[in-house]
Amino acid sequence: MQTFDAGVPLCRGIAHAALTATIPRAAEAAEKLRICLLDFLTCALESRDLPISVQAIRFATMEQGAAPVLGTAHRAPVPQAAFANAVMGHGLVREDMHTGSISHLGVVIMPTLLALAARRPVSGRDFIEAAILGYEAGGRFGRALITSEFARFFRPTGFAGPVAAAIAGSRMMGLSEEETASALSLAVNTLSGLNEWPATGSDEMFFHAGFAARNSVTSVELAALGARSSERVLDGAAGLFAAYRPGNPIPAITLFADDTPEILSVYNKPVPACNFAQTPCQVMLLLAREDGVRPGDVQAIRVRGTRAMVMYPGCDYAGPFGRILQAKMSIHFGVAAALVHGGVSEENYRRLDDPAIIQLAQKLTVEEGAEFTSAYPGRQGASVEVTLKDGTKRTRSLPDVVPATPEGVVQRFRDAASAILGGSKAAALEEAVSRLEKLDDVGVIAALTQS
């Protein structure tokens, strides 16, 4: 656990803790980081040809630069490469998830560090330590700021992400405590993202991660060049907590509380859909596989879960569905499609007007279960009750989401990377990630994804 004097400005205290902390359970945290990096690379490669990715790549490569744009032959200016790579990493809606902050930290941390690594050689060990500290700072900050009510309006990743990546980038690039505090403060000045997009499934959600990564790179580099930003930007009278949590005491943010790294509470999504749709879809699949529930037998479906699930924009939405992102956010569509298809994959979202799915989605209701809310965010449970046309009911529940296994993450990396990069380059990339702590220059990771 890393603590600091309560009288010290919060930015300075976090900076000091991040630069002096000894990472507990370091080997376990490093292995988790390796899996998160592979997962990020997989998502970025699979998303490369999506419209939002093509737009981000075209924007980023208007000028040439030093940093690789993943899965392409392009190199772009460092901030722009971070932007494009973050958008691609977010494109499938299958990025890693930190439930306590309702944030996707990896899609900001990874592209920030990979882009900054184009400035000079960075060892794999430094990359690992920096990334773990980024997850730690972003996770602790997000827990302190972001509530279910906050997330109704503001995009959590747009708030926790820049904090995470600014700390990670500062640590990796060797900034001093004063420089790190300024990088963090500058990043806090860029926090943004509104949650109106789920109503129409519009594109800004994907760009939130891009803005966060680009702004994090800029904040780190400005601080290294001598820019100084208020160290009271978090806890001052006109600071972030006063603005977004008025009337509440300034929280203590302690890194590695209970000697447990936040990265160990991150889970890798098993399917490409909203975090809050994951467990309900898994429960519906239990009903189909173990209770024999079939789409044509269903009269009504009741989903119970956490208050956060019910409140998050776009989750309690039964249609109509005009865009894929609306469907990926909707518990109604996700659960119905899981039953119709007998699984959850990208194929579930190919046809948004599938009559079988739409009919089932209209039969579904979502409500809070007190037992699930009380266990959140440590666990993310849900239950599904199906009323059949003969009047009988079938109910199943899970106490928590079942994450993708490390073996599953590795396999989907192999499948995607081999298809996109070719077998030999995919194998070389996997081998480089497997010996990440031994790399003299982590820049090889991004370079190996290039066509």
Image (tube, rainbow, N blue to C red):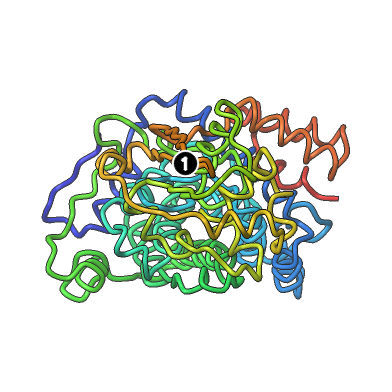
Residue that lies at the very extreme toward the front in this rendered image: 390
Above or below: residue 198 compared with residue 440:
below
| Quarter location, residue 284 | top right
> In the drawing, does residue 12 fall left or right of residue 102?
left
Residue 81 vertical placement versus 19 (above, below) = below
* x, y percent for residue 113: 56, 50
Where residue 379 appears, as percent x and y from the top left, is 36, 36
Badge 1 amino acid: Gly
Query: Which of the two residues, 57 or 329, is positioned nearer the viewer here?
Result: 329
In-image side of 195 versus 298 (left or right): left
Which of the 4 image quadrants contains residue 61?
A: bottom right
Instruction: Find disc 1 in the rendering and name its residue.
Output: 391
**Up/down of 191 relative to 109, above or below:** below
| Residue 15 seen from this side | no
Q: Is residue 409 left or right of residue 209?
A: right
Residue 221 rendering spot, x and y as whole percentages = 50, 64
* Element type at mark 1: loop
Q: Is residue 29 above or below residue 45?
A: above
For the point 58% across and 33% down, the residue is: 35
Residue 430 seen in render: yes
Quarter of the image with the N terminus is: top left
> What residue do we see at 50% from left, 30% from top?
30
Observer-nearest of 52 and 186: 52
Which of the 4 image quadrants contains residue 243? Answer: bottom left
